[in-house]
């Protein structure tokens, strides 16, 4: 089979090579999945560099999120051979890590759905306790996890504000359903804070979904409302911000960490439960994964460069063709 593999650590465009390798062999409790599509994630870049929290033994294939068919059956599934293995024509997955998908869900969208929609759903509903009628700010709303958060917050009956960089990404957020979008390239963060406060009658946001960190997290603290929940999703901005406890006390808000990967190991039943709810929402037309582009395996290295430079919106997906 064909697979993209890393033999030495470095930038994806330098170290990812398309090769012919032997098919993987499932062990007891595992199945072979024929890959139809795989999602590209920022952690794939970190894996290639050797900067991810897990460092697989060389050589390895990145790719932690795939959609395909269980070999020898008609069963269509999403699976997460996390963090590696997905950039190949076939992958081994644990039987308990298979999530059934309907025929109405194309493989490209299915591959783009699992991690980001799971993360956004756990963040908004389990960690953020979002209620209908509340106001949510989604930072980096045109990104993969941000686009999922906008759709899920709207499906929950929230008023959704989003931040994004540049006219194209602002329009993406509007198309996804955001009620108002603030362009941080056209206005500085202080202006956006004032705009959010004005739009909420001075109250501030009930929930803020922040995958950026750094200066954006600092601005989010200033625009959070009474009993608000500031959800820490990631640090795409590079700097890990500090959360002064005196500020949280005086304003009476919560800073809440969201690490979806822990649910896979500590509460996998909740992951399956959430998957069923996401399939219901997809079937009802309330969510629809935003796929920026679909590329063949050979173009994955260049696509990861674009992903790392924030030159995309939504999700990038690859297919074995």
Image (tube, grey):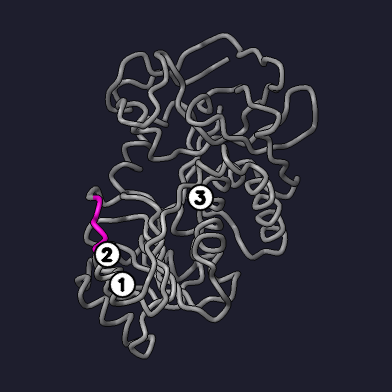
Would you say residue 10 sits in the magenta stretch? Answer: no
Report x, y in % for residue 124: 52, 63
- Could you tell me how far apart the alpha carbons at marks 1 and 3 are, in whole angstroms? 31 Å
The residue sitting at 69% across, 40% down in the picture is 99
Q: Which mark is residue 116?
A: 3
Which residue is more in the foreground, 299 or 129?
129
Report x, y in % for residue 256: 41, 59
Quarter residue 319 falls in: top right
Q: Is residue 69 above or below residue 139?
A: above
Q: Which residues are magenta?
A: 240-244
Asked if the residues shown at circle 3 and circle 2 are in contact, with their CB atoms under 8 angstroms apart, the answer is no
Q: Which mark is residue 245?
A: 2
**What residue is pinned by disc 1?**
249
Q: Is residue 101 above or below residue 131?
A: above
Q: Quadrant of the C terminus?
A: top right
134 horizontally vs 155: left or right: left
308 horizontally vs 104: left or right: left
Most extreme residue toward the top is: 22
Which residue is more in the foreground, 207 or 167?
207
**Mark 1 falls on what kind of element?**
helix
């Amino acid at each position: 089979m064909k697979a993209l593999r890393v033999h030495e650590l470095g930038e994806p465009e330098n170290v990812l090579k398309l090769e012919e390798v032997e098919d993987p062999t499932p062990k007891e409790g595992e199945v072979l999945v024929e890959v139809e599509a795989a999602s590209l994630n920022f952690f794939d870049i970190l894996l290639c560099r050797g900067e991810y929290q897990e460092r697989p033994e060389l050589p390895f294939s990145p790719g932690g999120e795939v959609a395909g068919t269980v070999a020898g059956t008609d069963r269509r599934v999403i699976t997460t051979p996390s963090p590696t293995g997905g950039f190949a024509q076939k992958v081994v997955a644990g039987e308990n890590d298979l999530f059934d998908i309907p025929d109405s869900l194309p493989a490209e969208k299915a591959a783009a759905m699992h991690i980001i929609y799971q993360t956004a759903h756990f963040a908004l509903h389990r960690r953020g306790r979002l209620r209908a009628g509340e106001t949510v700010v989604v930072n980096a709303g045109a990104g993969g996890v941000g686009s999922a958060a906008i759709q899920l917050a709207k499906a929950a009956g929230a008023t959704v504000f989003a931040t994004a960089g540049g006219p194209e990404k602002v329009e993406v957020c509007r198309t996804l359903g955001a009620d108002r979008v603030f362009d941080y390239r056209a206005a500085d963060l202080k202006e956006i804070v004032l705009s959010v406060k004005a739009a909420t009658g001075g109250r501030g946001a009930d929930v803020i979904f922040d995958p950026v960190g750094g200066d954006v997290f600092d601005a989010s603290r200033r625009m959070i409302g009474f009993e608000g929940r500031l959800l820490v999703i990631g640090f795409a901005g590079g700097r890990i911000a500090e959360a002064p406890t005196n500020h949280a006390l005086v304003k009476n808000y919560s800073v809440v960490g969201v690490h979806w990967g822990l649910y896979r190991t500590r509460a996998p039943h909740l992951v399956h439960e959430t998957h069923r709810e996401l399939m219901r929402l997809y079937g009802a037309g309330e969510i629809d994964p935003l796929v920026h582009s679909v590329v063949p395996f050979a173009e994955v290295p260049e696509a990861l460069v674009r992903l790392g430079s924030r030159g995309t919106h939504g999700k990038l997906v690859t297919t074995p063709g």
